Each structure stands twice: as C-alpha cells, then as structure tokens.
Image (tube, rainbow, N blue to C red):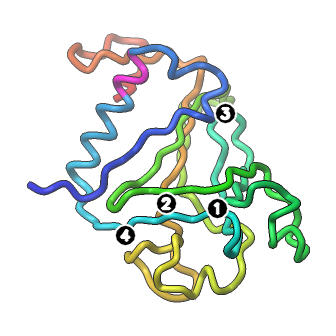
C-alpha cells in the first residue's frame, strides 16, 4: 500500500518538556507513522515566505490551549496584514514549508482540569487577504479543496494532560489506573 500523507511531528511548542522523555516521543512517532499509512490523501508541496501576502494560520497552542496565530512575515514591521490593520500575529517565523504529502502536527502538554486528558484540532485560517482563500494553489488547500473558504490542510496541533498517568509502552498491555498513550 502506497503512503499518502506523512505526518511530521513538531515539538517546538512543547514548553512543558513532556516529549523530552523518549517513551512519549516514541509513542507519538509510532502513532504518526500508523496514521501516515492509513491516510491516503495527496497534498501539494507548500512554500510560503515573507514578501507575498504574509499568509497566516492559527491553531490551539499545545502548551497553553490559547489560539496561536503564526505569520510567515519576518516581523510585524514587514507584515503587510498588520500594516493593513489586521493586528500583529502571535509569532513571526519568516517562512513555512511542507513537502508534498506532508502534514505537520504540533504537539505539547499542559494541565487540564475536569477529567479531560487530551485535545486536538486542525490549523485554521488566520487573518489573510482574500486572494489567499481564492487561489487554488494556496497553502490553504494544497490541491485538496479549491475555492474560497477552503480548509487549511497544513496540519494540526494536539495537547496532552501533564498530570495523567500515561502508559507509553506499546509492547505491553496498559495496566489498571493508567491511560494508553498510543
């Protein structure tokens, strides 16, 4: 079976150090490889950088749970969206790329309350010029959707509860009182 989407796990927002542990990292990488074999959608490569429309995308920050807006501009001073009144992004990265058939998953952990142990969600559009939504070659759709209001298919984010007693070993049955991370 041919692989469709390759899930690239990105740990940059793991400010709690949850994925510093080899067991946690191994389990999330194994899960990403499993889903990469299952999801057979094809996605066009994407390369966005400062100087164009200064595209933005948003997601729930894995370590805070707050909406986090990322701009490919170098700074607020070069961000055409900020200059046209959209306000500053939370983060300026200068560029973003994903290879063909690559989907990015930002991971991290934080404290949850009320029994919740994990939460995930997709990237979604940030403050963008209408051309970003309407362009069939936009990073917003990568050949998957076309037209205005296409879903952003760059990736997603997932956060895990730091206080949950996780079981990371995929070669053992999960013992009572623990939660199977995989």
Ranked by sequence position, the earlier of labels 4 and 3 is 4
Is residue 146 placed above or below 25 in the rendered structure?
below
Depicted 130 relative to depicted 71: above or below = below
Q: Secondary structure at mark 2?
A: loop
Is residue 95 placed above or below 150 in the rendered structure? above
At x 30%, y 56%, the residue is: 5
Q: Circle 1 sits in a helix, a strand or a loop, which is it?
A: strand
State left or right for residue 8 relative to residue 95.
Answer: left
Q: Nearer the viewer, mark 4 or mark 1?
A: 4
Magenta stretch secondary structure, dominant:
helix
Q: CA distance from mark 1 to mark 3?
A: 17 Å
Badge 4 vs badge 1, beta-carbon distance below 8 Å: no
Query: x and y percent of residue 156 in the render?
Result: 51, 52
- Residue at 45%, 18% in the rendered image: 166
**Quarter of the image with the C terminus in it:** top left
Find the distance from the CA under tag 4 to the CA under tag 1: 17 Å
Instruction: Please give the residue where the numbered disc 4 appears in the rendered image.
Output: 44
Q: Secondary structure at mark 4?
A: loop
């Amino acid at each position: 079976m041919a692989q469709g989407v390759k899930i690239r796990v990105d740990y940059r927002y793991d400010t709690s150090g949850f994925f510093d542990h080899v067991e946690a990292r191994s389990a999330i990488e194994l899960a990403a490889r499993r889903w990469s074999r299952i999801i057979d959608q094809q996605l066009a490569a994407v390369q966005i950088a400062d100087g164009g429309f200064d595209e933005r995308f948003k997601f729930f920050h894995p370590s805070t749970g707050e909406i986090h807006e990322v701009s490919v501009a170098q700074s607020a001073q070069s961000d055409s969206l900020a200059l046209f009144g959209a306000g500053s992004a939370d983060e300026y990265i200068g560029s973003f790329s994903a290879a063909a058939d690559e989907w990015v998953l930002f991971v991290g952990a934080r404290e949850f309350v009320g029994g919740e142990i994990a939460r995930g969600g997709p990237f979604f559009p940030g403050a963008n010029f209408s051309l970003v939504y309407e362009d069939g070659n936009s990073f917003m759709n990568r050949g998957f959707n076309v037209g205005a209001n296409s879903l952003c298919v760059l990736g997603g984010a997932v956060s895990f509860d730091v206080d949950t007693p996780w079981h990371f070993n995929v070669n053992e049955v999960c013992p009572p009182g623990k939660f199977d991370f995989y």
